[in-house]
Structure formats: C-alpha cells, structure tokens
Image (cartoon, grey):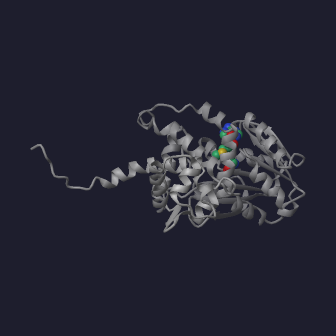
Amino acid sequence: MLVTKPQNNFEPIHAMLMQSFNAKAIMSAVELKIFDLLDGSVREASSLADEMEVSIERLEPLLNVLVAADLVVKENDGYRNTPCASEFLVSSAPLYQGDSMRLTMRFNAMVEDNITELVRGGEVNMRKTDQDWGVDEGIEGTAQDAMGGPLSPVIDFTASLPGFVDFKVMGDIGGNHGMYTMGMLERNTNMHGVIFDLPPVAEKSQARCDRFGFGDRVTTQGINFLKDHLPAGEFDLILTSHVLYIFKEDLVGALERIAEGLKPGGWYVSQHYSGYAKPGYEMAKASVELLTRLCGYSSHFIEQEELTGILKNLGFEDIRCQPVSETGLGLMIAARKAV
Ligand SMILES: C[S@@+](CC[C@H](N)C(=O)[O-])C[C@H]1O[C@@H](n2cnc3c(N)ncnc32)[C@H](O)[C@@H]1O
C-alpha cells in the first residue's frame, strides 16, 4: 500500500522544530528594534513598516509571531508591547536582555549544528569558548543575564549574612563583568573587591569596573582556578556565581582552595543550578544539561546535598540554602569557615 494512515499525531514534533525558528524570529525583532518602536505606544503595522522602511507583507507576519509569543498585544488600532517585552526587550530599558539573548543564540549555534557529531564523541573547541568570555559582547551579555535574574537576589542573600557590614575584602571567582562585585560594594561601602578570572577576561573586568566608577575599590587578577590558588586567609567573602560547574571534576579541590582563601569566620557564597533530579522544568533542565555535557563539562548541576556535604567535611559551619527565585533552577548556598 502506498498510503499508510498515521496512528499518532506528528504535529507536536513539527511544532517543536518550529520553536527554533520562532526563537530566531524574536531575536530578529530585537535586532530590528521593533520593541523600541512599540514601547509606550500602539502602532499600526503600516506606519511601523513605513518608519522601518520594510515591506508590510514581511513585517506583519513577524509581528504576529510576537503576538503568539505573548511579547506583543494586537489591539483594534495596532500593536503594543507587553509589560515583559517593555522590561527586557527595549534597548534603553535598564534590564535589556538583547546582548544576553544574542550570546545564548551564538553559544547554542556553536553546539546545535553539531549535536549528532558531538554525541558520537566530537569535541567543541573549548579554547574558543574560553576566549569568548573575554569578548565585549559576551561580557555585556553575561552582565545582562545576571541583571535580568539572579543578581539582585544573590546580593540580598549575601548582604543579609551576619557581619556583612564589617566585611573588608571580597573575592569573586569567575567574576567576569563585575556586576556581583560592584553590587556587593554598593551595599558595603567599606569593602574592597578582587575579581579573579582568566587573564584576558580579568583585564576587561577591570576596565568595566573602572568605567562604572569602582576603579579604586576593585582590583582584578588573572588566574586559572583549575589549578591556581587564591591569596591565603585574605577574604571575608568569596563568591562563585555560575562558576563552580567548571571545576566539578575536582569539586573538593576547588572548595579546599576557596576555604584556603577565606579568613577564619569568612563566608563562602555560591550560586549555581541545582535540582536536576527534582520534578519540574523538565525541558529547561534537559536542554541545559545536554548543552553542558556536549561542551565537555561533567554537569551544569551541583546538588545541595553534594555541596553541603563537601563543605561540612571541610569544616564549614552555619550552612544556609535558598532558591534564587520561586521559579527556575538557581540555588544559593552560604557557609562560614570555622573560626
Ligand atoms: C558562566 S560565566 C559566570 C560569570 C559571572 N560570575 C556570572 O554569574 O554572571 C563563567 C566565568 O568563569 C570564568 N572562567 C572559566 N574558566 C575559568 C578558570 N579556569 N579559572 C577562572 N575563571 C574561569 C569565565 O571566564 C567566566 O567569566
């Protein structure tokens, strides 16, 4: 028989493939600054097309993808941003995510066109990935990502630790854009910050902190924390935000070096993904883990029990754990080095 009657529905699989197309359409809408043009006003497609000097036949279906994605609302007299689009997709907004989105798309593209090969044992060029951390757009994208999500809760969590106002020196391993360090220094004006990162990144971190007016309160040091040590007994606070997974193959060794850097009674704070085996956010967890493993890391997730167990064995006390938000995969852990 030439014609076989389908027994199942293939449409959900096709819809999943189209999600990749839709993501790129949203990215293009950001690049075309459509959300800037729809901010604070309702615009007809024809007037928008005229201002953008594009054809309405091509613009209108793009606007309708944005409507279907709940980023734009279609009303009788035209289109307007949703509050979420105004907060994150307008280029002048304080929490603009355009560079962060471009960074995610670029990083994904490096992997997604080669998944078959990578699953079969191919390797991602990690030297290029490490270099990307020091590229300006990468730094700005990573900063935007932090600002749009974990930065504010991590700073609140850390600033509420006992004795925070008396901390004098903090270290930020893999501190990159410096937003965590500068945010902490804003909350404790007597504290100095040291950002540790790969040497080319550390240089850029210093320039960025200088630009934000923190030049005299932030120093940076190029290191490879896979093997290098921090100055011993120097820090009241050491932070690792989305960094610990890089050192997962020898987590105990990395945490020993962190303990070594802390003063007695100093605090360690980590922010990272956790809860891989817990129910919820299945596609988000599965895709971030696939991406991470195809890039050659052992996992992006560090479970609360594993980390608190190691910290206890290393003599840390007063361990506190809190989710970064009610939704999502982020976990914050703080622990105090024994006096
Ligand atoms: C995912 S980013 C996290 C940036 C920032 N902490 C945040 O949460 O937004 C990882 C950072 O770790 C740095 N890094 C990667 N490998 C490193 C290594 N071996 N030693 C020190 N830093 C490293 C990268 O350069 C990058 O700045």
Residue lying farthest left? 1
Q: Point out the image quarter for the N terminus.
A: top left
Question: Which is more toward the observer, 255 or 22?
Answer: 22
| Residue 9 coordinates in the image, percent (x, y) | 26, 56
Res. 273 image quadrant? bottom right
| Residue 191 coordinates in the image, percent (x, y) | 87, 55
Q: Is residue 266 visible?
A: no
Question: Which is more toward the observer, 118 or 91?
Answer: 91
216 left or right of 20 in image? right
| Residue 147 coordinates in the image, percent (x, y) | 69, 56
49 left or right of 145 in image? left
Question: Which is more toward the observer, 67 or 53?
Answer: 53
Ligand 1, by image quadrant, is top right
On screen, residue 113 above or below 239: above
Q: Is residue 83 visible?
A: yes
Q: Residue at x 86, y 49 (%)?
A: 213
On screen, residue 73 above or below 109: below
Res. 331 image quadrant? bottom right
Q: Point out the image quarter for the C terminus.
A: bottom right
On screen, residue 214 above or below 70: above
| Residue 30 coordinates in the image, percent (x, y) | 58, 50
Q: How many marks?
A: 0
Q: Residue at x 61, y 56 (%)?
A: 37
